[in-house]
Image: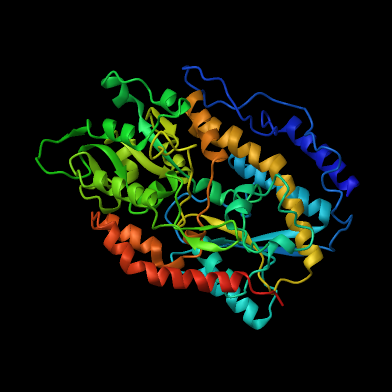
Amino acid sequence: MKRTVAFIVSVIMLFSVVSCGEGNNPPETTVPTTTEPATTTEAPVTTEAVTTGEYELDYLPDATYDGHEFVVLMTNLNNNVVIIRDFKWTEGGTVLDDAMYKRNLLAMETLDITINGIEDYRTSNTGLASIRKANSAGDSNYDMGIIATYDCGRLALTGDLCNLAEYGYIDLEQSWWDQNINRDLVVDGKLYFTTGDISLVTTAAMYNMVFNKDIFRDRNWEMPYDLVREGVWTFDKMKEYVLQVSDDLNGDEKRDSNDLYGMVYIHSSVIAALGAAGERLASVNENDEVVITLGTEKAERAVVSFIELTQNRECVYNGQTATGGIDAVQMFVQGHCLFRWIEHIGFPYFRDTELDYGILPLPKLDESQDRYYTPFGGWDAAFVCVPTSTEDVERTSAIIEYLAYTSSKIVTPAYYEKTLTGRYVRDNESHDMITIEIENRIFDIGYVYSIGNLTDMVENLSKSYSTAFASRWKAYQRGAELACKNVNKTLHKEEE
């Protein structure tokens, strides 16, 4: 594979020369913390080759695959939002589109393959149905999937996905695979779905908070970035701001989406609040077992604190039940709220507006919390997986590992340096905040495996504005623990 790595370097170097400013260096981990606004122009031209280390891919076979059609099935449960289309690229589109095109072209030329991305974005469980159908028929229709969160969990538990921790040439310890998933989701040496540089869908589904800088200026408040840096950006601090922002903007004495609020959220934001506190529905313990963790005092406090805040309907608005003709996205764009709980996938809606906004990580529950945590939205995320019916482990794993590696050199820089920073980030401080978010991603195994319907339990409390956590937990606990026992039994079962 030494020849292949050398070719990667030469091609990336060529792309750097001809792409009019599309740099391909990995994103920096720190940026200047000035108060000057960031520009939306492209980064300076760079002609430097990517540093690959000493042949990082020398464990891959030096092979080509006779024009093999590498088919990627891509599903998502949300067909109404801007989705990063990992393997359905176009040349001459956005910087990110071009980067994906280059990655795929490089793989096709180097490995002698074609790549066919099949999209099926619907609210039904299309990934689950398609992969099960292929497996049942013994058809190798798909080499790889980027499949919606809950479908991945169900497919893993029914034995329909390959264990990526022991799948040919895939090396999950490499930097182009998400090490946070290795920490949070590996059980008994098994991991059936993951993410990393090869797919940006789950990265785009990571939660954060956006805020209206004009409202801060109007009230002579200091921008909250220093609170984050000092480790004191907490739920209570956010609440202080939220409770000071409320106005009947159109004077009709009726509270709807036409008015001003301190915070706008949606139903799943309460799950994000749980994750932001560093808590989870379930976790993997020191004995390599999945255990329910929702019943802790801190988890209860995180959920109840969030719901108590939403009970103040003068200052807080549920954008998912918006009335008044303006949806949750437009409420923020049109200046109808101070804070908006949102995933990165929502940034494109702000791109061509005059809105002056900043980006923050979700707040800590309190100052004693060791760091900020970044959960993800399960409805919008999708994970890389391989159906058990996929043929030729050596070929499939080598192609996937190659794509993951080249994505880290070509696609990821285009996303962080050109798409997030160049298109969506309006100031240097927000770039700092995104760095904090990405470094502190967490994955809740109870969430992705839908253990014991605990997600529904927490969201239903929020939907009904109820703080009766203790009684609801008592009703769910026995069933959740039984479901968790079955998950452990499945994940610890010897593979055939």
Q: Which residue does the image show at 71% across and 71% down from the upper left?
A: 390
For this orientation, the residue located farthest to the bottom is 137
In the image, residue 426 above or below residue 442: above
Q: Which residue does the image show at 44% across and 33% down from the upper left?
A: 359
Decide which of 245, 309 is in the foreground and name it.
309
On screen, residue 376 versus residue 10, left or right, reads left
Q: Where is residue 416 in the image (x, y as percent from the top left)?
A: 59, 36
Q: Quadrant of residue 289?
A: bottom right
On screen, residue 29 versus residue 212, left or right, reads right
In the image, residue 315 above or below residue 44: below
Decide which of 326, 161 is in the foreground and name it.
161
Colour mode?
rainbow
For this orientation, the residue located farthest to the front is 287
On screen, residue 184 versus residue 483, left or right, reads right
Q: Position of residue 474 (x, y in %)?
A: 32, 65
In the image, residue 133 above or below residue 248: below
Q: Quadrant of residue 470?
A: bottom left
Residue 54 seen by the camera:
yes
Q: Which residue does the image show at 49% across and 49% down from the upper left?
A: 205
Q: Where is residue 33 in the image (x, y as percent from the top left)?
A: 52, 20
Quadrant in which the C terminus appears: bottom right
Q: Position of residue 5 (x, y in %)?
A: 84, 44
Number of numbered callouts drawn: 0
In the image, residue 281 above or below residue 412: below
Residue 84 seen by the camera:
no
Q: Which residue does the image show at 74% across and 63% down from the upper left?
A: 166
For this orientation, the residue located farthest to the left is 253
